[in-house]
Each structure stands twice: as structure tokens, then as C-alpha cells.
Image (cartoon, rainbow, N blue to C red):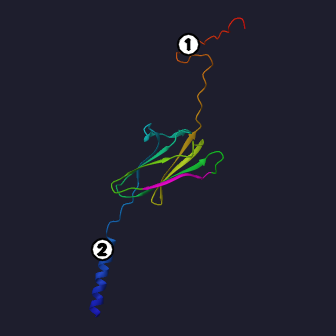
């Protein structure tokens, strides 16, 4: 019986040391992250550093450095927006990639338009903050109305003169 227990202990120790030597899974990280406006076709366009209040949605593009499955989460947070408490979460969404899928395209959209101010995009891999980037949303300027009676189609156009009918 004593030999049986000794044999069992040797087998268990070999099993524990073999499992300790197995390589651990490399954590998934971010190879690239950028913010973008809509390309006009409903997809993320080129990287930008700021937005206007009418840029809805805002795209967050995350390129992972591994084809392993991972849960990626995006939070859009208020940094400094008049009338809103700093730290307020505007948008939160997450996505779990499948094997051999290493790109995630998030969109963030408020109800209506963005309020002008500073925001931050926080990207998490699992529960760990991987990257954080601030961006500005600026008030969209309304186009100036054309002066009355001016033809804006030709640069050399002169204002039209409106004549009143005689006898009135």
C-alpha cells in the first residue's frame, strides 16, 4: 500500500509540473486605434482628430494584434461639455471577436446631434483599459444667408435692382 501512495504522489507531481510548463496564452493587445467620420457610404473613413456637432455617428476603429478571440469594449465619456457632468458615459458598447477576426468597428451616436465640447474614447480588452484618447466636438457653423438680390452663381454678378412700377 505504501508503494501505491508513493507512485500516486510521483504521478501527481509530474502532472503538476507538466501543466506549469505549458505556454500561457498571450494577451490580445491593440495594434492600431483611431477615430473617424463617416465616409459617405456608412463606413469609417480616414482618421481624424476632431469632429463637428453634426458628425453622427463617430467611428472608433480597433485593430487587434492577435487573431485570438477577445472581448473589446468602447466607452465614450464626457471630459468637458457645458451642462454635463465630467465622467458621464455617453455611449458604451462591446463586441467579442471570433477566431481570426482582429478588427472591430464601433459607432457612437447621441440622440440627435453631439453637444460641443471634449470627449474621451476608452477601449478595453477584456476588463483592462488598453487605450484612451480625447477628442473635440466643435459647434457647426450655420452657412451665411445670401444677400438679397445677389446672384451667387457667378463671381462677377452684380446686385439686381428692383424697380417699382410707375403710378403707384
3D distance between C-alphas at marks 1 and 2: 86 Å
Q: Which residue is mark 1?
A: 157
Q: Which residue is mark 2?
A: 18
Q: Position of residue 31 (x, y in %)?
A: 39, 50
Q: Nearer the viewer, residue 151 or 124?
A: 151
Query: Against 89, is 116 above or below?
Result: above
Residue at left 30%, top 77%? Answer: 15
Q: Position of residue 1 (x, y in %)?
A: 28, 94
Q: Residues within 10 Å of mark 2 (few under 14, many from 20)?
A: few
Query: Against 94, is 40 above or below?
Result: above
Residue span colored magenta = 86-95
Would you say 137 lies left or right of 34 here? Answer: right
Query: Against 79, is 143 above or below?
Result: above
Residue at left 34%, top 55%? Answer: 67
Q: Main secondary structure of the magenta part?
A: strand
Q: Earlier in the sequence, mark 1 or mark 2?
A: 2
Residue placed furthest toward the right: 168
State the SS at label 2. Answer: helix
Q: Position of residue 127 (x, y in %)?
A: 47, 60
Q: Are marks 1 and 2 in contact (CB under 8 Å)?
A: no
Amino acid at each position: 500500500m505504501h508503494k501505491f501512495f508513493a507512485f500516486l504522489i510521483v504521478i501527481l507531481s509530474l502532472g503538476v509540473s507538466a501543466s506549469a510548463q505549458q505556454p500561457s496564452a498571450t494577451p490580445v493587445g491593440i495594434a492600431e486605434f483611431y477615430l473617424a467620420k463617416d465616409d459617405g457610404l456608412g463606413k469609417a473613413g480616414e482618421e481624424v482628430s476632431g469632429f463637428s456637432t453634426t458628425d453622427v455617428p463617430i467611428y472608433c476603429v480597433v485593430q487587434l494584434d492577435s487573431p485570438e478571440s477577445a472581448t473589446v469594449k468602447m466607452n465614450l465619456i464626457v471630459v468637458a461639455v457645458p451642462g454635463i457632468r465630467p465622467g458621464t458615459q455617453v455611449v458604451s458598447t462591446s463586441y467579442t471577436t471570433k477566431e481570426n477576426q482582429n478588427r472591430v468597428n464601433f459607432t457612437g451616436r447621441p440622440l440627435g446631434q453631439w453637444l460641443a465640447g471634449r470627449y474621451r474614447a476608452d477601449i478595453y480588452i477584456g476588463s483592462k483599459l488598453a487605450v484612451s484618447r480625447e477628442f473635440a466636438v466643435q459647434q457647426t457653423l450655420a452657412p451665411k444667408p445670401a444677400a438679397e438680390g445677389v446672384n451667387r452663381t457667378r463671381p462677377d454678378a452684380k446686385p439686381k435692382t428692383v424697380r417699382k412700377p410707375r403710378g403707384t
